[in-house]
Amino acid sequence: MKRLFPWLVVLAFASIPLWLHDPYLLNACITTGIFIIAAMSLNLLLGYTGQLSLGHVAFFGIGAYASALTSLGLDVELIGGFRVVHEPWPVWMGFVLGVVIAGIFGYLVGKLSFRVRGAYFVIVTISFAEVVRLVALNWVELTQGPLALTSIPPFTFGLPGLGYVDLYGKVENFYLVLGVGVICQLVISRLTKSRVGRAMVALKENESLAVSVGIDVTRYLILAAVISAGIAGAAGSLYAHYLRIIDPDVFMFLYTVTMVIMVITGGKGTLAGPIVGGLIFGFIPVIARSFATPELQWILYGALMILIVFVLPQGIVPAIEKWFGVTDDKSATLEPVKP
Amino acid sequence: MSIDRTIKLILPLAFAAGLVTQASAQTIKIGVNQPLTGPFAASGTYVVNGAKIAADEINAKGGVLGKKIELVIEDNKSNPTEAAAVAEKLITGDKVPVMMGAWGSSLTLAVMPKLMEYKVPMVVETSSSGKITTSGNPYIFRISPPSAIEAEAFKPMLPKLGIKKADFLVINNDWGRGASADFGKVLKDSGVSVGLVEIMDQSAQDMTAQLSKIKASDADTLIVTTAVEQLTLVLKQAHALGLKKQIITTGASQNPDQLIEQAGVAANNSMHLTTFLPWLPEDTPNPDATKYFISEWKKRGFNFAGTTESFRGYDGIRTIVAGIEKAGKAEPAAITEALWHVEVKGLNGTVKFAKVGPAGKESAQSTPNVYLVKIVDGKVTHPKL
Amino acid sequence: MDQFLQHIVNMFILGGTYALLGIGLTLIFGIMRVVNFAHGELYTFGAYFVYLASALLGMNFFVSLVIAIVFGCALGAAIEFILLRPIRSADIDTTMLVMIGAMIVMQNTEQYVWGGVAKSVNTPFGESALVLGPISVSWLRIFVFVAALALIAGSYLLINRTKLGKAMRATFQDRDTASLMGVNIQFIYMATFALGSSLAAAAGALLGPVYVISPQMGNLASLKAFAIVILGGLGSIGGATIGGFILAFAEEIGAGYISSGYRDAMGFLIIILVLMFKPTGLFARAERIG
């Protein structure tokens, strides 16, 4: 039964468009879903390796821009008079490239920042995100800067010969986001339950001990960073092709904060955490809009954050599990290290 | 567990939303999509207050098509994702047949795909990015000038101001960069050379580096494009550095009163391109309307400095209502068609739309008046050029 | 050459206030290991307080500055007591989240109370400037520079020459041993946060009149403060001071000679470079603060 539970949840989500017809709420579901995917990627890094990256939105944005530019085509002049021209490619290739390029940046940041730890890592990641934002803002030839990339094509699915379907509608996009989300969750789940995952947790719990038993700490951290960045890039790509317009505001620090809130209040280091946190903090603004003035909405948001952290410092999911006397799968707890 | 809870929260809300829309079938709704929190909150609030004055005036005279109009005002939090979500809510939840918004250019650009999707028209009251009217979106009706139009209006003033070479200092967004491009072109066409083009980040507070560079240049004029807070800082810092060039600001939403109040002596002798003259109603195209608007604004206790932005809210709503009137019914398609034929005596001039953009999918652009004002001894003057 | 000299002068003035911001944060970050996102909000608070006291209540400008710092101290102590003490044992990211929540609440309360329109404060200095040949600096900025230096010196003396400072350094070095030696850790934490907050409020009180006061002014301040802390090394006042000047230098020269659009990126690029080669910052002495 326990094994089936996640699949029941997926089915429940899948049924939403069948009874929820309000486009505004469906829109909220889709954008929330995209941010949940991004939160899941942050959870991989934060929850399982213990490294807090506050620049995660950089990977989200890089994925968005890479995917959008791939599908729009580009024409830039690099240093040295080199002209790079690129013809538009199908959107799904943009998605793939978005994931890959974000992953590459994840690798670079990983290699760079894992020489530092804790608080320093936090600052480096913030700096990285700011620099990326400023590049997107200033390299107008490539990114259109503040003028924004518009008319981004939506996802297209189909097979040659059988015809193509353009995903303009809400329902189709909802299922796309759900599908990608499920795949990402599966990837993360497999990873954390495997040997790699256990190594990452060992790293988080006691790094020097892990090193002393021969675990190649840096290698696993970098692996986590790459996958985490890639998934964030996937979310970014979905965002770009759903909203169909992106500008450097996509790198707003606010989005990183949103992801962090979702992960920590939901319960970092748990598989369900980002989803729970995401649903709550994705929908609070939607609900609050109907009865609170704009500033009050924000104040409620901040107050709720503080409240949850005070009352449930481990997050909501671990608290629920404790309540029901159910412990999560073993990968989240420390296994005794065999001599 | 959490899913159930979420469902139980959403369903009743969806019903409630439906009920509410039923109950107010007696009014005609107009959606207002503006930033009420975040960095642009001050401006968005001004526009909304101007809109309310228009709505109250119209309702006092009986409304339109026999019904009162109702402004459905939503906050887009100065954030493009929110702007798009708000547009979605206004169109699908509140079922507004027409909208006004969304203040900033990137906010408006984010809303545009929704307009295409649902075929609902929007009157753009402030945004100035050229892209808005050249993207092939036939649901855009803009009453504010893009910087290209502003620059064209500036052209005849050039010889009278004696400008031989100008530097630019602009804010790093589409508005600033667009301005430097459009004005630069007009300058060059008139035989004036362009010197430095310096940029300042949206949230930067210290421009002494850029200003020091400009101080050392050989231009005689500095053209600045940015919002009023940053402009205050630019003027103060330029003054402290002893910058001797003549300063002209563009952007048409300048707020000379706030500059005088906050930059004091540093604001003197600066010149500004505006699209409204609240200080000199006699010089506006419709002096009576201007006087009415200003007295109403003061009566409500709002900051006088806000009139340079709020008049757009006022003109925007009146334009929309004229469109509804002409259409004969409160439906998006009819209103879209009707707006092409309206002619409204706005506070800033006559609102009349012309086609711009790619053939077959043109957007609408009206050409407002542009004025040059100068701050002399702490007062706003309108030099006769 | 003239332009260069002007840039250098600008750099000194800017650096002093940046240093103030950095010192406050390096103490909090260094001693308490709290990623204090609300630091920028104390900065904003200091600025609005000066506005309230001098523009609205008509008090003397200099008196307003002092009172703003005092209230900033009190607010810092209150925040520590209410928000941080109960979650003392939580992870670094949990405390960070609480600070982010505090930041959101504070910033929007400020917006609600004061509105979004920027405010300015008139000072006895007016807009007049000191002109030395090709260089021009406003008197107000010179005052701010001097005041900042005084506060920096004061902080240094506090940390290195007083009993309280000694206790702080001991706590930074080894919390448990310090506790065993009789240091009241709870009090030290509160004092540290209060001190750091009062420095942030001081920076805001001094810079508010130089720039304009708006609810969002703290965001950039926070980010730059973090940059300075990293540059200078955690817990090092001297490092934060020098870090402040380095950041100012990078911004002035970067904006003046390379590209003004990337001005704010300069600081961040430097951080990344510094951390690549010296992961603990330029001046960190891991065992000591001061």
Image: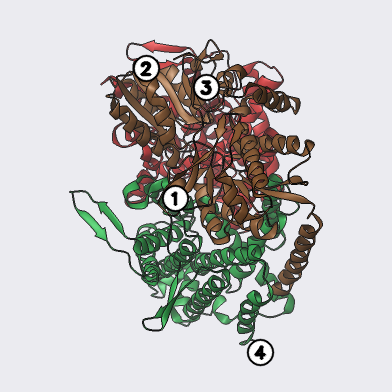
Chain identifier of the red chain: C
Q: Is residue B364 above or below residue C159?
A: below
How many labels, in total?
4
Tag 1–tag 2 contact (CB < 8 Å): no
Rendered shade, chain A: green
Q: Give the amino acid at mark 1.
A: Pro
Q: Position of residue B277 (x, y in %)?
A: 57, 22
The residue that mark 2 highlights is B245
Q: Which chain does tag 2 point to?
A: B
Question: Farthest residue in the bottom direction?
Answer: A1
Q: Is residue C110 visible?
A: no
The residue that mark 1 highlights is A248
Q: CA distance from mark 4 to mark 1?
A: 45 Å
Between marks 4 and 1 in the image, the one whose residue lies nearer the viewer: 1
Between marks 1 and 3 in the image, the one whose residue lies nearer the viewer: 1
The residue that mark 4 highlights is A1
The residue that mark 3 highlights is C147
Q: CA distance from mark 3 to mark 2?
A: 32 Å
Front-most of residues B39 and B110 = B110
Please report the residue visible at 57 percent of the width from the left and 51 percent of the height from the top: B337
Tag 4–tag 3 contact (CB < 8 Å): no
In the drawing, does residue C175 fall left or right of residue B27? Answer: left
Q: Position of residue A81 (x, y in %)?
A: 18, 49
Rendered shade, chain B: brown
Estimate how packed mark 3 is, as few (under 14), some (14 to 19) or many (20 or more) residues with alpha carbons within 10 Å: some
Image quadrant of residue B220? top left
Estimate how packed mark 4 is, as few (under 14), some (14 to 19) or many (20 or more) residues with alpha carbons within 10 Å: few
Q: Position of residue B22 (x, y in %)?
A: 79, 60
Q: CA distance from mark 1 to mark 3?
A: 38 Å
